[in-house]
Amino acid sequence: MSFTNKTVVITGGAKGIGAGCANVFYQDGANVAILDVDDKTGPEFVKKLGDRALFVKCDISNEKEVQDAVEKIYGHFGSIHYLVNNAGILKYFSVTNTSVEDWDAVMNVNLKGAFLCTKHCIPHMQKNNDGVVVNMSSVQAFVAQTNVAAYIATKSALIGLTRSIAVDYAPNIRSVAICPGGVDTPMNRDAFRESPNPEVVRKETENLHLNGRMATEEEIGELVAFVCSEKGAFINGQPIRIDGGLGIKVGGSKKE
Ligand SMILES: NC(=O)c1ccc[n+]([C@@H]2O[C@H](COP(=O)([O-])OP(=O)(O)OC[C@H]3O[C@@H](n4cnc5c(N)ncnc54)[C@H](O)[C@@H]3O)[C@@H](O)[C@H]2O)c1
């Protein structure tokens, strides 16, 4: 895939899946702009990527910051073709244990952040008559882990937002939701570390996947790059699961 002279904006690209996406797009020739609140890891990462990478500190839940960041990227690269709404946070609570503050925090980053970045990037895509908005949903839009109510609500809503963007901006701008299973990222590694037995929980998580492991960040990045490329041009308005077969097994039979 060649993304020469194309610009991708990746939210939450300082680490994890966003960084995996940034690596793939950069290797395929794109200009890569990363929006992230992490102004320690983000600048170090873009320095490692090279000259066609830009870090802009931005809290995607704040419209003014998003507006300024998008203008800065457009001023720097002169175009925006792809937006990967990837930044997300997870809080471990059931509905009855979720405070309004935690609910709002998850909604504001995972859903409002995607809305705001889409709102301010699409006008630039319209200037190219060409663009793709990728929303990082989750396999949890289809199968639910316990005690992550707000997170699951946002990941399901992102699939609706994807359809809405697809129908409103067709035919030149497409939108696709990506639904990963477990990915070996700081988000998961932090969760394992906080559990009483990190190695056991990691193994249990790996074994939920028919592949017996979690995905790498770059495996998700490769799919995101494919759907943005010409090769993925007929994929529109859909959620795509990339989950190592998580959740499809209903049990074993007695006979071989
Ligand atoms: N890791 C998984 O197993 C998995 C599975 C399915 C979906 N996802 C989704 O993929 C996305 C990335 O997950 P990850 O595991 O790489 O997470 P991560 O925590 O490893 O990285 C997330 C990045 O987002 C940034 N971020 C957080 N809040 C932000 C904000 N308000 N503004 C800008 N940046 C912000 C963080 O600083 C960080 O760099 C999330 O939307 C997550 O829900 C992850």
Image (spheres, rainbow, N blue to C red):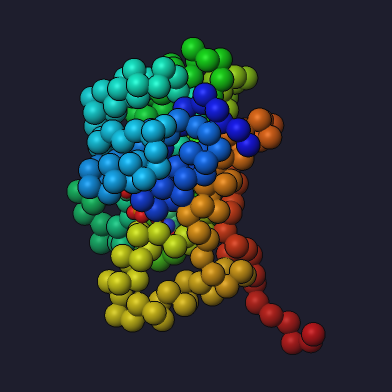
Q: Residue furthest bottom?
A: 254
Query: Residue shown at 60%/33% (left/top)?
Result: 2
Of the 4 image quadrants, the one containing the C terminus is bottom right
On screen, residue 114 above or below 243: above
On screen, residue 256 above or below 38: below
Of the 4 image quadrants, the one containing the N terminus is top right
Query: Residue shown at 47%/77% (left/top)?
Result: 203
Could you tell me if residue 226 is visible in this image? yes
On screen, residue 217 above or below 118: below
Q: Position of residue 194 (x, y in %)?
A: 27, 71
Could you tell me if residue 111 is visible in this image? no
Q: How many marks?
A: 0
User: In the displayed structure, does residue 182 sit left or right of residue 209?
Assistant: left
Q: Residue furthest right?
A: 256
User: In the displayed structure, does residue 98 sit left or right of residue 75?
Assistant: left
Q: Position of residue 161 (x, y in %)?
A: 47, 34
Viewer-side residue, 25 vs 58: 25
Q: Position of residue 46 (x, y in %)?
A: 35, 41
Q: Give the quadrant of residue 83.
A: top left
Query: Residue shown at 29%/80% (left/top)?
Result: 196
Q: Give the quadrant of residue 53.
A: top left
Viewer-side residue, 50 vs 244: 50
Query: Residue shown at 61%/69% (left/top)?
Result: 211
Q: Position of residue 215 (x, y in %)?
A: 52, 61
Q: Give the quadrant of residue 251.
A: bottom right
